[in-house]
Image (cartoon, helix red, strand yellow):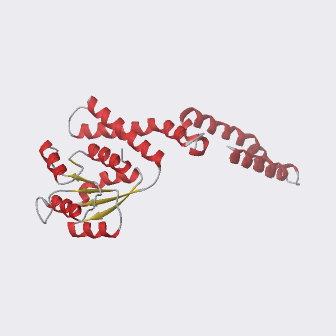
Amino acid sequence: MGIVALALVLVYALASVVTFGTALDTQLRAPLVWFLVVYPVLVLGVFAWLIAKHPNRLYAPTDFRNDDAFLAATQGQLKSVAFLSAAQARRDRLDAVGPEDEQQVSKVVETVVRRVREGGESQILWVDDRPENNVWERQAFMAAGAEIKLALNTTQALELLGQQDFDLVISDMGRVEGDREGYVLLDAMRQRRDKTPLVFYATSNSPAHKKETREHGGQGCTNSPTELFDLGMALITRL
């Protein structure tokens, strides 16, 4: 607002000097006079429309007293986008949005807001021989402040784990190496005394597979994107 006001003052000052401080004939002076009359009305109209229709666009993060105030103000927008995404997904499957969807969306939004408050960037290793199948899931983690590195097989994953520390490993289960290759990676990590949390993002969400994952030293197994995100963020933030 201050910059706009300063620009208006400068424009008017220059226009006034040119209009009344120089010897312009009537034909050249008339457009400048009309500009001085119409321009403030136009600017006032644009600001009135902006305030009436899009008041949230007048604020920047620095306009709030602290980060929590900004996050609280934008949390509703995050929920709107998330709810619409959930509704569209359900519509594509010809199913209805139920109370459980609302709870999942609210939980995801709260997780993102909490993570933004804490700051910092997490390192995630994502192991999958078909990474094109989980593009949106990776985008969700990246939007929450995580940096992701990809590995296409167990060998690459172990090499990366030996080169740097990760906060979380997300792995598929079956790959070209074998139907239980995810357990091969997990067992190799634990044999190396690598305690990095690992979650399987596979086709199964059965209690039996969750139990088996824990027996191998893993932290979870799911086929749900929202459960994966919530579990992954909880492990990253050590909640």
Name the foreground residue: 54 vs 231: 231
Image quadrant of residue 170?
A: bottom left
| Residue shown at 30% from the left, 69% from the top | 162
Report if residue 41 is visible in the image.
yes
Q: Quadrant of residue 45?
A: top right
Query: Does 187 sit left or right of 45 as displayed?
Result: left
Rendered view: 156 above or below 183: below
- Rendered image quadrant of residue 149: bottom left
Residue at figure coordinates x 29%, y 39% from the top left? 88
Disc count in the image?
A: 0
User: Is residue 77 shown above or below 181?
Assistant: above
Question: Could you tell me which quadrant the C terminus lies in?
Answer: top left
Where residue 148 sits in the image (x, y, percent)? 35, 60
Give the residue at the far top of this rendering: 99
Q: In front: 72, or 26?
A: 72
Return the x and y of residue 174 as percentages of the image width and height. Answer: 14, 58
Query: Would residue 83 be seen by someone viewing this image from the given angle?
Result: no
The residue at 74%/45% (across/down) is 35
Q: Quadrant of the N terminus?
A: top right
Left or right of 117, for residue 196: left
Left or right for 34, reference 46: right
User: Where does residue 48 sit, x and y in percent of width and height?
Assistant: 62, 34
